[in-house]
Amino acid sequence: MAPKQKKVPDKNHKGRQHALNTIQPKAAGIDLGSREHFVAGPPLPDGSPNVKRFGTTTPELLRLAGWLEQQKIATVAMESTGVYWIPLFEILDSRGFDVHLVNARQIAHVPGRKTDMIDSQWIQLLHACGLLRGSFRPGDDICRLRALIRERNTILNQRSDWVRRIQKSLDQMNVCVHHAVSDITGHTGMAIIRAIAGGERDPLVLAGLRDRRCQKSESQIAEELTGNWRPEHLFNLGQALRVYDELCAVIADYDAEILKSVDSLQSPASKDSFAPPPASKDKANKFSRRGQEPMRQALYRMSGVDLTTIDGIGVDTAAVFMSELGPDLSAFPDEGHFISYLRLAPNISVSAGKKVPGKFRAVTSTRVSNALRMAATTLRNSKTALGAYYRRISRRKGASVAVFATARKLAQLIFRLVRYGQAYADTGSEVYEARFIQRRLATYTRALKEMGFKIEPLAA
């Protein structure tokens, strides 16, 4: 029996009719690359493909935009491939095109791919038929602020790495600064480290640099500051401290530029408005101590809401939220869509009323959800309603689930505040626990009543 011959796709696809209805006739698709872009417009009148190749230099991108204008294209779809899409997206957006940035996974999941099509033609066909949904992207002004805050947070993570290097050098010399103080980057910790790098070795002199607010005495601190002072570890400590100081200076420059960018986004009517002081004195002192009060006021004038009124939300978290999503959340129909976009909705597969076991679907957490998770961890010991909510979930299902659930609760409160202006009011942990006990009592009473029992309170 002769082997079955593999069918060779027909390369001459002139006049090929696709069983899809065109919704957007003036649509184009772009296949992005590091050295060249392929652009597919609507098929020519004779049915032949309308594909053109362009380079990736700026003159070539401008020529690409001009070709789309000659073709009278109104909307363009492209995959979010690395960072190659950013220059072209910005040029097309400035020219007035309706640009859709599409997730590559969404295109791959569409069945029925024609083998005689190149990628740009397939993207153009799907976009013309309305089968592609563009990713959410805030306005251009918010994107400028987002680029600054993202890079600032990257440098902040690098600074944290150099703090660990400082800690490593101290541990190798058996100088336990982290035992003497709670934070080696605080006032006392950095004073001791700088003195060691400057040549001081006497533990009593080093302990005398303690701040008056330290809980440990000078004698207790001096006991932890006797080391072996090997020269190679001292040199590593000095170099790590030098890099740490340079990164601190870079972060300070970023903070000034970010504050300037936020000020430029304020409306003229809000120039003289001020956010009310935080309800918590500890939160107000923390903002003042870290120098974050100007940024808090600037974010309030930009958005008209103060996210820091929500327990657990600090200025850095509010800045990340505003830079990633902006003050306009009208793109999300309700808080359910918003929470799903942040990857904070539980992934529960149910079929016919039963949970379906399946493989874990890996999804990338957004920067906003990561910031909300970090904010949720700060509520572990908080004497607020959100803190009581975190502890209740943690007792039942563990800390990881409690962090996820509390982050989801924070996302709900933020959406209601930004979208509808619904202010957050903390009822306190005691009120929350009392309300939770009443709900449990009602549930147990109803269940026992169905079983034929009668509940009566115990005599005092």
Image: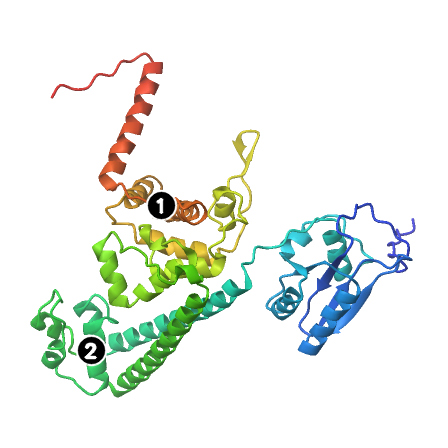
Up-down relation of residue 47 to residue 88 (above or below): above
**Marks 1/2: CA distance?**
42 Å
Image disc number at residue 191:
2
Residue closer to the observer: 245 or 391: 245
Residue 107, position as x, y percentages in the image: 68, 53
**Coloring scheme of the render?**
rainbow
Q: Is residue 158 visible?
A: no
Residue closer to the observer: 266 or 292: 266
Q: What amino acid type is highlighted by mark number 1?
A: Ala
Identify the element where label 2 is drawn: helix
Q: Is residue 457 left or right of residue 255?
A: left
Up-down relation of residue 441 to residue 260 (above or below): above
Q: Quadrant of the C terminus?
A: top left
Q: Residue at x 92, y 48 (%)?
A: 1
Residue furthest to the top:
452
Identify the element where label 1 is drawn: loop
Residue 16, position as x, y percentages in the image: 88, 52
Q: Nearer the viewer, mark 1 or mark 2?
A: 1
Q: Is residue 153 left or right of residue 35?
A: left
Would you name the residue on which mark 1 appears?
A: 423
Dot 1: few (<14), some (14–19), or many (≥20) neighbours within 10 Å?
some
